[in-house]
Amino acid sequence: MVYISSWDEFAERSIQLFRADPQSSRYVMKYRHCDGKLVLKVTDNRECLKFKTDQAQDARKMEKLNNIFFTLMARGPDVDISEVSGKEQSEAQPTKKGRGRKQ
């Protein structure tokens, strides 16, 4: 098991690992509340990549990586992931105004 310290390197290598063998690849998230640590693991039973963080700002990056993996799993490993972002669903929904009474 390899802990990768750089988020960009972890994301890039995990996407490559998934694209190489999508049938046997797994993506696991584990959060330990008592330690306040989040561990992400991507493996294909031959190579195991891990990223550990305790920074709250990495949650946004994790959400984007989740969306990338969902896209790869749903559309296939050869899809272009350059347009995938973490806010696609929320931008499509209109914002609601206040809940006050109409006059």
Image (cartoon, helix red, strand yellow):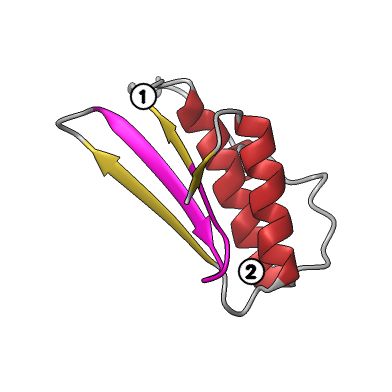
Residue sitting at 52 percent across and 71 percent down? 45
The reply to whether discs 2 and 1 touch (Cβ–Cβ < 8 Å) is no
Looking at the rendered image, the disc whose residue lies closer to the viewer, 2 or 1, is 1
Residue sitting at 68 percent across and 32 percent down? 8
Q: Residues within 10 Å of mark 1 (few under 14, many from 20)?
A: some
Image coordinates for residue 40, horizontal then vertical, percent? 45, 46
Query: Disc 1 on helix, strand or loop?
Result: loop
Q: Does residue 41 show up magenta in the picture? A: yes
Horizontal arrangement in the rendering, residue 103 relative to residue 25 (left or right): left
Q: Does residue 61 show up magenta in the picture? A: no
Q: Earlier in the sequence, mark 2 or mark 1?
A: 1
Task: Note whether 55 is above or below 66 in the view shown.
Answer: above
Query: Disc 2 on helix, strand or loop?
Result: helix
Q: Which image quadrant is residue 35 in?
A: top left
**Residue 95 at least partly seen:** no
The rendered magenta stretch, by its main secondary structure, is classed as strand
Residue at numbered disc 2: 73
| Mark 1 residue type | Asp
| Mark 2 residue type | Met
**From which residue to which does the magenta span run?**
36-50
Task: Note whether 35 is above or below 71 in the view shown.
Answer: above
